[in-house]
Amino acid sequence: MSKRRSNVLSFSAMVLALFSLLLLGAFTSTTLAAGIGKDGTIAAKRGKATTLDELIAMYDSSSCFECHQDIHEEWSQSVHARSVYGTGRTAATFRTAFTNGFMNWAYSGVEKPEDVEVEHLMGCAKCHLPQLADATDDVAKELVATIFDWMDAYQNDDMATFEKHQETLLDLNINCLVCHNRMAITHKWTDGYPQDGVVYGKNAGEHYDPNFPIVRQGPNMEASILCGQCHGLGPNLELDNPTQCATGYGSYLFSYITNGGDKTCQECHMLESGLGHNIQSYRSEVMAEKAIDWHVTARPMVWRDGRNVRPKVMVDVAMTNKAGHGIPDG
């Protein structure tokens, strides 16, 4: 090998080594600064919640309400504000998933409520309560027990116990800190992990909240992928027992975008709708009108059948999906 070629290779190796060190240093500093490892905990609140009350306190966003009253009012009308409770049916479905699911699956390891762990609930909680990943298995057991006791109290007409558990379930929701901290950064190896004391928005600057004194620009706050983390590509194949639920983001990518669509989820569901943080779908008359074009024509006629002449109506119905994804979907 020539001396020149040897020098070139040596120089290349030095550059590669230097780049590797810089990359490692950047990654290490980002990880340490964020205060997060790969154990599922987030920087906003280090460690794991050990009770439902701790988990609720960990994601307490009440300090946001004073300055953002209008947004809070919008959000409080949304399904995000009651993502675990819903109308009551969502919480009841958690119990159904437990009794008809885990307890009937031969290899789930669940025979009774006391056997449940966080991983069992993530098929539902991945979207309805993603912060459950920041809690211990004791919290999963407490959540299941709360839902069972809430339903039993209703059936026994014990309204005091029913309302107590209902309040707890309503406090478990997708609030400000879930979207503006925990889920704000999708590509954590490239953009870093959510930081302690930081909320993420469209702009960066000072934030007049002693708990979260900094606002940083979130790389995905105006991108559909922020919503797509929960609103689905299809089966959650990363789970040990995959579930099929929302596929809205998948059809948005593979149908709407590929056919020339250019709007984001936020543009349709927050801005153009005028709903803001009261993010709605088919339950909203505004969104229903935006989603579908109806054309109905009807004409009267008579039908002769032998000696009988009967009046009839011919009705033609044409529906066009104007939404950016398949409907209905979640």
Image (spheres, rainbow, N blue to C red):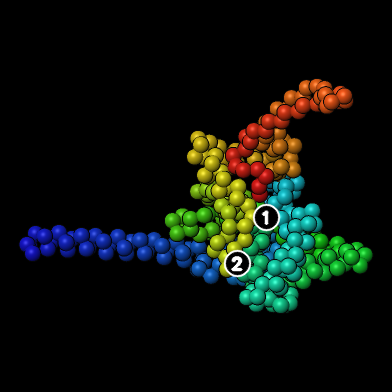
Q: Is residue 169 at least partly visible in the picture?
A: no
Q: Nearer the viewer, residue 275 or 14?
A: 275
- Rendering coords of residue 169 (x, y %): 76, 61
Amino acid type indicated by mark 1 = Ile
- The structure residue drawn at horizontal position 61% and vertical position 54%, both measured from the top left corner, is 230
Q: Nearer the viewer, residue 107 or 61?
A: 107
Amino acid type indicated by mark 2 = Asn
Within-10-Å neighbours for mark 2: few <14, some 14–19, many 20+: some
Question: Would you place residue 254 above or below residue 158 in this image?
Answer: above
Outermost residue toward the right? Answer: 157
Give the quarter of the image for residue 43.
bottom right
Outermost residue toward the left? Answer: 2
Query: Mark 1 or mark 2, which is nearer the start of the sequence?
Result: 1
- The structure residue drawn at horizontal position 54% and vertical position 41%, both measured from the top left corner, is 255
| Image depth: mark 2 or mark 1 in front | 2
- The structure residue drawn at horizontal position 60% and vertical position 50%, both measured from the top left corner, is 247
Q: Nearer the viewer, residue 219 or 236?
A: 236
Which residue does the numbered mark 1 point to in the structure image? 174
- The structure residue drawn at horizontal position 58% and vertical position 54%, both measured from the top left corner, is 234
- Rendering coords of residue 46 (x, y %): 58, 68
Which residue does the numbered mark 2 point to in the structure image? 241
Question: Would you place residue 301 above or below residue 248 in this image?
Answer: above
- Rendering coords of residue 119 (x, y %): 62, 69
